[in-house]
Amino acid sequence: MAIFTGSGVALVTPFHEDESINYDKLDEMLDYHCTHGTDSIIICGTTGESSTLSEEEHMECIKFAIERVKGRIPVIAGTGSNSTYTTIQMSKEAVEDGADGLLLVTPYYNKCTQDGLIAHYTAVAKEAKAPIILYSVASRTGVNIAPETVAALHKNIENIVAVKEASGNISQISKIMQLTDGKIDLYSGNDDQIVPLLSVGGKGVISVLANVAPQYTHDICAKFFEGDVKGSCKMQLDAIPLIEKLFCEVNPIPVKKALNLMGWQAGPLRMPLTEMTEAHTAQLAKELEAFGIKLA
């Protein structure tokens, strides 16, 4: 059984103005997603600015999310690192705290080989006994997970059950599904490709869009699974202009600005991320309103 089916929100991490984690606001966001269609919480991923959280903050944030969600929907912890040892330690702690699954990005900067990826994921999976989602996003990490590598890991390691594919390469994604006989759980890592990935057997999306439109993102998936492919496709295409604005600067700059425009008080970004330009902010605000989202 899949960890989740439908829309998993790649949740932002709200900060106070002094850039400390705003746990009151995080609690509010978690509750909102549990009651507005989101099918899973992904905490401390890229969108959650995990790269600028200390390890202590990282683990506190994961534990907090698990405790506040209280089993209403699955909580998947982003515990990937460029250090295998660090990944193991954080993953084990997240599992002990009750995470329903782990999202493990490829080790960045090291740029290991495919054999290195197999060794890395095998070591983590052996120590952290929870369902694991491989996260392939070479545009950020410099390392692509080859379809053959995904297939080998899925075949040989019981708790490697899924892949978040953010390569944008539909041919690669189709190859993964062919090599795994469609048995690996596939999640889109790109909001503009939800329906294309569902069409080759995907289970859903790990979504930035869901931060601002949780029910809508859920419904794209739900319509597809209900057999209303035409309706799902229309929703996908209608969302493209907003999705483009949510990625007009590096994620999560635009989505955090969007939440602030909506009155969520998600707070600032941590450097080296900087605030969105005025021109892009105006374009984003216009597109949010055109999509039917009220601004504060």
Image: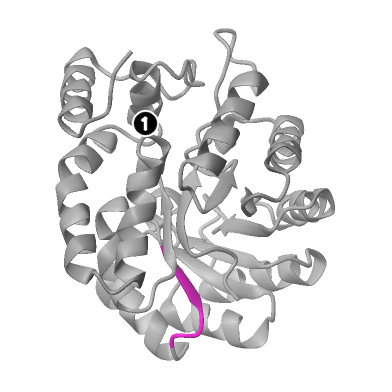
Q: Quadrant of residue 118?
A: bottom right
Q: How is the image coloured?
A: one colour
Tally the marks: 1
For label 1, count other residues whose C-alpha is less than 10 Å away and answer few (under 14), some (14-19) or many (20+): many
The span shown in magenta is 182-187
Residue bearing mark 1: 255
**Picture residue at 81% right of the left edge, 66% below the top:** 127
* Residue 5 included in the magenta stretch of the image: no
Q: Position of residue 33 (x, y in %)?
A: 52, 40
- Is residue 72 toward the left or the right of residue 35 in the image? right
**Picture residue at 33% right of the left edge, 25% below the top:** 258
Q: Position of residue 280 (x, y in %)?
A: 20, 22
Q: Quadrant of residue 129?
A: bottom right
**Picture residue at 45% right of the left edge, 91% below the top:** 181
Answer whether residue 102 is visible to the viewer in this image. yes
| Quadrant occupied by the C terminus | top left
Amino acid type at image mark 1? Val
- Is residue 214 toward the left or the right of residue 86 in the image? left
Q: Position of residue 145 (x, y in %)?
A: 46, 69
Asked if 272 appears above or below 248 in the picture, the reply is above
* Residue 186 included in the magenta stretch of the image: yes
